Image: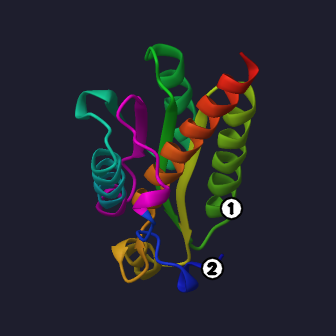
Amino acid sequence: MATALHNLSNYDANKVPSAADMHFGIVVSEWNENITGELLKGATSALIENGAKEENIFIEWVPGSFELTSGAKWMADNIKNLNAVICLGCVIRGDTPHFDYVCQGTTQGIVDLNLRYDQSFIFGLLTTDNLQQAEDRCGGKHGNKGTECAITAIKMVAMHNRLKGMIQ
């Protein structure tokens, strides 16, 4: 759904399971830190508002969005009981094809992690044409993508836990 039709920060709290027993990693890009820092605030606030304990939220910074995938993999490999990793970054289109390579590579990397691991890796990469679009999506007029990613992480962990319970 187009962001213009949906505020990223709006969700029905009654449809969000408790995150009290969940463990989350958040990997954040330093590039465009003015944007990604706000995404991080949105994500952590939403996790805590829905029951996650601060000590169960692990945050690591990586230099750029392309490094989100390796940072997320290392978190999943090294933090016990981690249920999901939220990947937060921002790439703003420039004058060269670099934008396309970073966006495609990061997207494919997160897809690959989701297929290889028994955890969810949440795609929180803003891919915008300009700074204003990024600002609008990190707490501006379109809400905060970080909030949306946190709610997605909680719901995916709950779904995974339900499905695992059905198999046993």
Look at the image and tell me whether residue 117 can be seen: no
Instruction: Name the residue located 40 percent from the left edge and 60 percent from the top edge.
Output: 13
State the separation of the CA atoms marked 2 and 1.
20 Å
Residue 126 to residue 121: above or below = below
Residue 152 to residue 26: above or below = below
Q: Which residues are magenta?
A: 13-36
Specify the quadrant of the image occupied by residue 166.
top right
Instruction: Name the residue located 51 percent from the left edge and 28 percent from the top edge.
Output: 83
Instruction: Name the residue located 43 percent from the left edge and 39 percent from the top edge.
Output: 27
Mark 2 packing: few (<14 Cα in 10 Å), some, or many (20+)? few
Q: Mark 2 falls on what kind of element?
A: loop
The three-letter amino acid code for the residue at tag 1 is: Asp
Q: Which mark is residue 100?
A: 1
Mark 1 packing: few (<14 Cα in 10 Å), some, or many (20+)? some
Q: Which quarter of the figure is the N terminus placed in?
A: bottom right
Residue 140 position, x and y percent, is 34, 78
Front label number (2 vs 1): 2
Front-lying residue, 33 or 76: 76
Residue 75 position, x and y percent, is 47, 24
Residue 81 position, x and y percent, is 46, 18
Residue 9 position, x and y percent, is 41, 69
Residue 160 to residue 11: above or below = above
Q: Which mark is residue 2?
A: 2
Q: Mark 1 falls on what kind of element?
A: helix
Residue 17 lies in magenta, yes or no? Answer: yes
Please tell me which of labels 2 and 1 falls first in the chain.
2
Q: Which mark is residue 140?
A: none
